Amino acid sequence: MGKDNDIHKTVRIISIFYFQLGQLMTTMTIIPDDSPARRRGEAAGAISARLNQWVEWLCAAILAVMVLDVGLGAFGRYVVDLPVTWTEELARYLMIWAALLAVSCGVARREHVAVTAVLDRLPEDMRRLLCVAIDVLAFAFFAFLCYFGIGMTAAGTTQYATIFEMTMWMPFAAVPVSSAVVCVQLVLMGVRDFSLGSMPATLVKEAQ
């Protein structure tokens, strides 16, 4: 019960903060090129871009290993008729890590799938406020995943993989780690968009 109250309080504080942020954004004017706000926004965008680059390289490396792993499994099963039993399970865990880490890349580039038919017809101030609200909900959701993912990862230390002689904490850790990276990217993108006075739909590369 106490944990639920803490979560509700945290979500409420974040919601109030972003609501006030949204109100300020609706009255925002063009920010001078040499202002501290613009420098802060550019710095947040640069940090986000660098973090996203590292994550993208990590995802690429995981995918490369997964391709080799699946290729080895197919070669062993259909060419030499000697099935390698651990390749399927390893591919599953690698795919989980790659897919969850890639969520933060979509957030950093503002490229997640969205239906914008209604959003595009709203006035700019309303669109900005709605985008901020969406970011708030996304942050609350991924913070929730991160919080409970930590507990799930801890519980995974007593569970073992089917074939590998390892505990399940490493596959389970993909949930809190990826959720934490998404939360960091959402905060950086919020700071960037607010400080630069841009719509949240802009790509992260524009801040580089």
Image (cartoon, grey):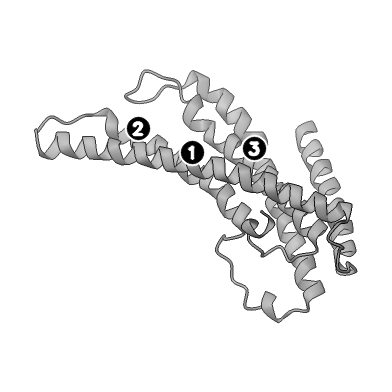
Amino acid carrying mark 2 in the image? Leu
Look at label 3 and name its amino acid.
Answer: Cys
Q: Which of 49 and 171 is in front in this view?
A: 49
Mark 3 secondary-structure assignment: helix
Residue at figure coordinates x 59%, y 46% from the top left: 52
Residue at image position (81%, 51%) is: 39
Helix or strand or loop: what does disc 2 sit on? helix
88 to the left or right of 27: left
Which residue is labeled 3 in the image?
146
- Please tell me which of labels 3 and 2 falls first in the chain: 2
Quarter of the image where the N terminus is located: top right
User: Tag 1 or tag 3, which sits nearer the N-term?
Assistant: 1
Q: Residue sitting at 68 percent across and 42 percent down?
A: 144
Pick out the residue farthest to the front: 34
Q: Distance between the residues labelled 1 and 2?
A: 16 Å
Instruction: Give the numbered dot on residue 90.
Output: 2
- From the image, tell me which residue sits under label 1: 58
Could you say where residue 126 lies in the image, as x and y percent from the top left?
80, 73
